[in-house]
Image (tube, rainbow, N blue to C red):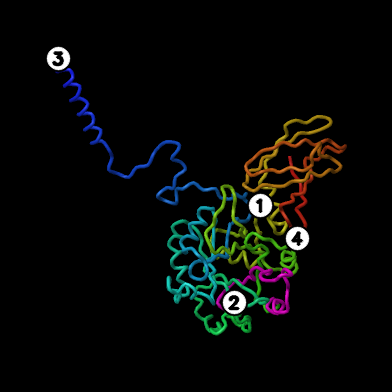
Amino acid sequence: MKLKPFLILLLVCISLKISAQEELSNKYTRPSSPAAYPYQARNILIESRQPLYLPEVEGYTLLKCDFHLHTVFSDGSVWPVTRVEEAFHEGLDAISITDHFEFRSINDKDVNTSNLTREYEIAKATANELGVLLIPGLEVTREVPTGHFNMLFINDPSPLVKYINKENPRDPSNIEDILAAGKELGAFITWNHPGYQKPNGAEWTPIHESLYKKGLIMGIEIINSGMYIPLVHKWADEKGLTKMTGTDQHNGFYLRDGHHRAMTIVFARERSAESIKKALLAGNTVGYAYNYMYGDRKFLEPVFQNSLKTRVLRNTDTDIAIEIRNTSGMPYEIELLGDDSYRPDRNNKITLYGNETIAVLMNKNGNTNESVFHVIVNNLQIKAGKPLNTFIKF
């Protein structure tokens, strides 16, 4: 009789152990504790992202684009679908895979490059699923100083094969012929990385002057791989060329949180491939890299103005304190200017980071009927070497 309580307790423990084993799930699970986050969702559509947020500009839809990318279908190291998924993660609206047209056979042993649009076909279904606009494209690759040219919006590039010299694929002798043929197919043509393989920097050569006069250079990369060339920016303004930015990425992207790739910001009328092409032909673009923007005042000024919300914190006979909130994801390097109405109280240089709020103190300078003070925004370049001179209204 003395063993009965012990036996009862033993039977209860055995029963609980069996019960616990029976309750173990045979389904896929993941920890729900804070240590388990962040995690990659099974559906890419619902993953957390940190795109570069830009303000609305009346009459335009601002589209973030990368029109210069490579895959294993030439000399890149990634699969076409990866390019689309990277773009989605970064909040891009449109990309173009522009593999080297003359050097598609580099990876023939691994992928079938005989189909001239295969990379586009592979990427298209994922692009449609994720809402990324996929623009067909290719890169014409010829010897320097002739250089490399992207041709966008060509659906069937097979008529261009005859312009490749199989003995010397980089032969530049028929560059005019292949670009002219591309233009006939509806291509938007841009001159890539004008400083490539040039120890003295970018040069506008007689070859490029001839192509330009014949309408075979429509855009030019003022930024390639994040590197900006002020002289090329000047050429674009002088010659009316569309300002382009391409990452020219061959391997995968490895961006730190809060950082963004270089990109072309297209001021389009709507979010569509057709509207992007119209905008490129009209020159409605801004270059972006390392939190600097390069483009015409008519685009950069409203981007800045529409990013800001202000309110007066205090207003005395001698000074005024103004709160400024940046509603965009773009930081602004601002230099406060003195004028007949106001002058900065102390430090005249501030950085207004994306999604942050600061306050500035301005001393009154006599005429205080004005409700604006003037600033220079150093990381918005309206011309090569010329930052945006504008105002902040309160």
Circle nearer the viewer, 1 or 2: 1
* Residue marked by disc 3: 2
Q: Please name the residue that numbered disc 1 is placed on.
A: 291
Q: Residue at x 52, y 66 (%)?
A: 76
Q: CA distance from mark 2 to mark 4?
A: 29 Å
Crowdedness of circle 3 by 10 Å Cα count: few (<14), some, many (20+)? few
Cα distance, mark 4 to mark 1? 16 Å
Q: Amino acid at mark 1?
A: Asn
Which SS class for mark 3? Answer: loop
Q: Residue furthest front?
A: 2
**Inter-mark Cα distance, 3 to 1:** 81 Å
| Residue underneath mark 2 | 183
Query: Which element type, helix, strand or loop, lies under badge 1?
Result: loop
Q: Nearer the viewer, residue 120 or 237?
A: 120
Q: Are marks 3 and 2 in contact (CB under 8 Å)?
A: no
Left or right of 252, for residue 337 = right
- Tell me the quadrant of the picture where the C terminus can be found: top right
| Secondary-structure class at tag 2 | helix
The residue lying at 86 percent from left, 38 percent from top is 367
Residue 240 in the image: state x and y as whole percent.
71, 68
Q: Which residue is mark 4?
A: 384
* Dot placed on the residue nearer the N-terminal end, 4 or 1: 1
